[in-house]
């Protein structure tokens, strides 16, 4: 089971004690070992007087939680014995498989420490932890195997995005071969540069709904913005309104929670079908430019393009051909066994390959994997 992106502002409990996988940004499922992380965070604060990570900025907090190691407790408080600090740091491991695997294993180590202290040993005590940490169950590490070439290639393309490019990667494969798992491994690349990672998915039964996947992805973005401080919200509101002008209602019809950020917008003039699509495309482009910047590159993962509507296909072409766009990484996945030469998505790709300013990178996820 893969975790979805989580709006941390809506989570129950104190964020200081959540595990990295609870953010939904680690490509890891949440199991009982998240409680061991929370216990470690509690011990940490009890002994040092502060939690492992602190920040009034939610994005900075997530960045630190996912990518930085907390300062060992004995560094913050020299009265803490190094072996105790070592136990706490093991509980706070980023990956669940690197933590204690059971409360019983933790208890045995703590009992061994207690007995050593009772015998008069103290600061010099040291031993290998978790030697008796048997769970009695098969634990398969939640890692992606056999995709090193694909991950390496996408990492190279990501470097081009960081240099200011707009890039698109196509991931083709049958249903269930691991396209989404591959992309969510790539998601971790953005942790270190405060990138936005958004995802949407077209639906077989929603083909007539314009921009179905884009509206999902951008609604996630608005939720993340709404979790920020009031001062930051005012800045984002100004940036968005400056970008989209008097056409805000066009977007709020597609992204309902946008009104919570920019307020109710005046109605826009009615246009013909194609003119309406053209206007929407331009507004979408202006809106996305606000968030694809060097300070925070934008990764937009859209799945199941074989079911995309025509307006979304036009938007895809517009984004790739937008000479004002930068720091945008489009990752598009589709089932290549459900498309054909005259399929609208394939026609769109051929148009892009023939006329657009950038290269398109293709990765196959089927049995005969290859990287182009």
Image: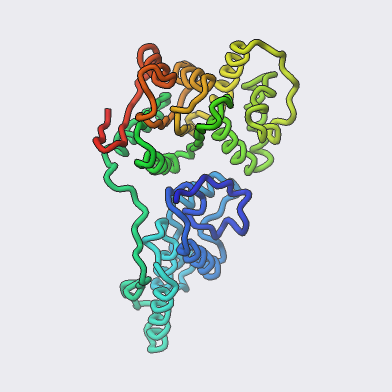
| Residue 272, quarter of picture | top right
Disc tally is 0
Residue 147 x %, y %: 29, 42
Give above or below for 220 relative to 53: above
What residue is drawn where x is 52% and y is 56%? 53
| Residue 288, quarter of picture | top right
What residue is drawn where x is 68% and y is 23%? 248
Q: Is residue 143 toward the left or the right of residue 233 in the image?
A: left
Residue 172 x %, y %: 35, 31
What residue is drawn where x is 45% and y is 59%? 71
Q: Is residue 358 toward the left or the right of residue 211 in the image?
A: left
| Residue 177, quarter of picture | top left
Residue 156 x %, y %: 32, 33
Instruction: Compare residues 148 and 157 and report the one nearer the observer.
Output: 148
Q: What is the basis of the colouring in this image?
A: rainbow
Give above or below for 108 relative to 302: below
Which part of the image, by quadrant, shows the C terminus? top left
Residue 283 x %, y %: 60, 20
Toward the bottom, the furthest residue is 119
Give above or below for 45 relative to 274: below
Instruction: Compare residues 18 and 145 and report the one nearer the observer.
Output: 145
């Amino acid at each position: 089971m893969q975790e979805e992106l989580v709006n941390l502002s809506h989570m129950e409990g104190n964020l200081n004690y959540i595990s990295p996988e609870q953010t939904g940004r680690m490509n890891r499922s949440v199991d009982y070992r998240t409680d061991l992380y929370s216990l470690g965070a509690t011990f940490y604060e009890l002994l040092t007087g502060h939690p492992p990570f602190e920040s009034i900025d939610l994005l900075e907090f997530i960045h630190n939680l996912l990518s930085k190691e907390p300062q060992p407790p004995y560094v913050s408080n020299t009265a803490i014995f190094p072996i105790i600090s070592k136990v706490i740091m093991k509980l706070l491991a980023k990956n669940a498989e690197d933590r204690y695997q059971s409360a019983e294993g933790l208890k045995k180590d703590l009992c061994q420490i207690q007995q050593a202290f009772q015998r008069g040993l103290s600061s010099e005590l040291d031993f290998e932890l978790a030697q008796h940490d048997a769970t009695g169950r098969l634990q398969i590490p939640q890692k992606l195997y056999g995709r090193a070439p694909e991950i390496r290639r996408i990492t190279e393309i990501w470097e081009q995005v960081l240099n200011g490019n707009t890039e698109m990667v196509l991931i083709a494969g049958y249903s269930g071969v691991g396209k989404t798992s591959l992309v969510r491994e790539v998601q971790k690349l953005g942790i270190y540069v405060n990138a936005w990672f958004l995802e949407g998915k077209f639906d077989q039964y929603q083909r007539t709904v314009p921009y179905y996947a884009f509206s999902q992805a951008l609604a996630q973005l608005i939720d993340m913005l709404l979790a920020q401080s009031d001062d930051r919200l005012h800045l984002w509101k100004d940036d968005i309104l400056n970008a989209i002008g008097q056409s805000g209602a066009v977007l709020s019809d597609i992204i309902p929670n946008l009104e919570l950020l920019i307020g109710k917008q005046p109605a826009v003039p009615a246009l013909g079908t194609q003119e309406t699509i053209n206007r929407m495309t331009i507004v979408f482009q202006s809106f996305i430019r606000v968030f694809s910047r060097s300070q925070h590159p934008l990764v937009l993962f859209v799945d199941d393009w074989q079911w995309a509507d025509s307006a979304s296909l036009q938007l895809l072409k517009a984004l790739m051909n937008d000479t004002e766009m930068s720091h945008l990484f489009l990752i598009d996945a589709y089932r290549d066994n459900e498309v054909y030469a005259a399929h609208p998505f394939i026609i769109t790709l051929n148009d892009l390959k023939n006329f657009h300013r950038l290269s398109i990178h293709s990765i196959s996820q089927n049995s005969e994997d290859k990287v182009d």
